[in-house]
Amino acid sequence: MWRLIVCVWFAASGLALDNLYSHPRLIALSPTHHKWMNTTQVHGLMRDGQRFRDITDIQELLYGCSQTLSKFPTTVSQQAIVNPLLKQVSQEAPRAMLTNLTRFHNRYYNGDWGRQSSEFIYTLVRNMFPQVNVTRFQHRFPQASVIARVEGNENNGEIVVVSAHQDSINQQDPQNGRAPGADDDGSDTVAIFEALRVLATSSLKLQRMVELHWYAGEEGGLLGSADVVQAYASKSVIADLHLDMVGVPAQPPAVGIVTDYTDPDASKLVRALASAYTDLPTRDFQCGYACSDHASWHEAGVRSAIPFESQFIDYNTNIHSAQDTLNTVDFTHLLKYVRIALGFVVEVAGFSTLPAGKSQTELHETLQQKASESMHSHGELVNGVVYGILTVPAEGNTVRLDSNAGCVLTLWTAQLTTDRVSYLRHLNIVSRDGFAHAISRLKLLETAHRFAWVRPEVRSQLFWLLSELVKVSAHGVDQVVLALTRQVRSGDVTQGNVKLCWLMVRFVRENY
């Protein structure tokens, strides 16, 4: 299907338009070392592998722009929302798109091949996702950045960015050399396209606006991202997750976490996402000055993070050459970064607590109707709500229960709320048996071998729920409490047992 959908425009000639370098450019080789350079000198930096920023047009941004950093999640709390999305992730679209993207002679930002490749990305996104707003962001050079917007359902003024750069160069001949750019940076171009495909075809309603950015001119000194960040200076950007090279793993494979010119909290979240949604460890490393486009957001005071394909910045020796080809890309590895990106979007953008267009009253009526459909429907709803109470503490950190605990949480139920008080309100609405089914679920945790698997955060939530059930004199709750007292081990002074004893004492003092 994708082979038929994706079409490519090939240029008869790759002559550079060269309008960017008609005058010298101010190049930053470090935060303090700036130098005016012409085309030949800039290309010389590329041949030498020297990282740099072109700051000619963004000096005011560098010294005058600073955005307030908002409260940011650092733990994984929305597995129930993310996991169904991950089941939709596939190699088909990324492989087809990258096959065509690497057919361009190169994607040099200041030439016609770069212009055509950006037009290919724009047209593909526009045609494939008519429900998504997609625009070209024009620069002073031929290649345009491409921005696709998934509207937020509640906080449309706040933006979460997931980005990659689209250009490629041959280090020895940036303007005319063959540069398929499969890994650098075609792998990320198609990775965020796949993330967009999953989001655009799902029923998930995000709270904040999410934008997918394909930047032009990264190889020319972060040109495209600098222009975009400058244009967004007055907007409320919550964070940027930037991908740059995700297709060639090292041995042993790992997710590299860039720790310089990035935000510690955003990087902490990425580590947690990699742990939750991939089978790879994470390894921290420093990438250096002007490493990639995340630095443009970091410079503007916006949280940024970048998960890299490995723990070694120079592991893939094929980049910036004719050897950076499609057959070198590991698509299984690439998709792990799509998973990280989807997790990042859900955690940071949030999801709507109400189905679009429904009031709280309508939602409660829907819950009541569904709970009355059948015993099975009632049981599933109660299971989901109990799971939500146990895994969503007051601070909003979800903790996974062991699957044998019998708690089933459907995506539909999870979209209703994100805090334990609201889950308890839903439990009151859907329960048709005086909480008997809910209490039967809690009894599954009574046995010693199962209770030992329950994490401390879930234990705290369990006692909170039991307190609420005691307040309404729910039948059978005392038996659950009595059974839990047997889990306190005499003479055991380990931290877990002491905490359990403290929870039990506090519970009895407050409720009996």
Image (cartoon, rainbow, N blue to C red):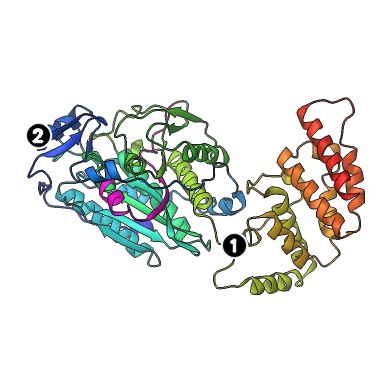
Kindly report the distance in space between the C-alpha atoms of the residues bearing marks 2 and 1: 55 Å
Residue 40 disc label: 2
Mark 2 surroundings: few (<14), some (14-19) or many (≥20) residues within 10 A: few
Q: Which residues are magenta?
A: 226-251
280 relative to 433 in the view: left or right: left
416 relative to 286 in the view: left or right: right
Q: What type is the residue that disc 1 sits on?
A: Thr
Using the rendered view, name the quadrant where residue 183 is placed.
top left
Looking at the image, residue 308 lies above or below residue 189: above
**Foreground: 35 or 12?**
35
116 relative to 360 in the view: left or right: left
Using the rendered view, name the quadrant where residue 469 is placed.
bottom right
- Residue 336: in sight, yes or no? yes
Looking at the image, residue 484 lies above or below residue 313: below
Residue sitting at 63 percent across and 46 percent down? Answer: 397
- Residue 93: in sight, yes or no? no
48 relative to 202 in the view: left or right: left
Under tag 1, what secondary structure? loop
Residue sitting at 35 percent across and 40 percent down? Answer: 244
Residue 31 disc label: none
Q: Give the percent coordinates (x, y) of residue 149.
A: 38, 60
Q: What type is the residue that disc 2 sits on?
A: Thr
Looking at the image, residue 488 lies above or below residue 65: above
Q: Which residue is identified by label 1?
A: 353
Residue sitting at 64 percent across and 70 percent down? Answer: 360
Residue 248 covered by magenta stretch? yes
Q: Earlier in the sequence, mark 2 or mark 1?
A: 2
Residue sitting at 36 percent across and 44 percent down? Answer: 188
Q: Give the percent coordinates (x, y) of residue 5.
A: 34, 60
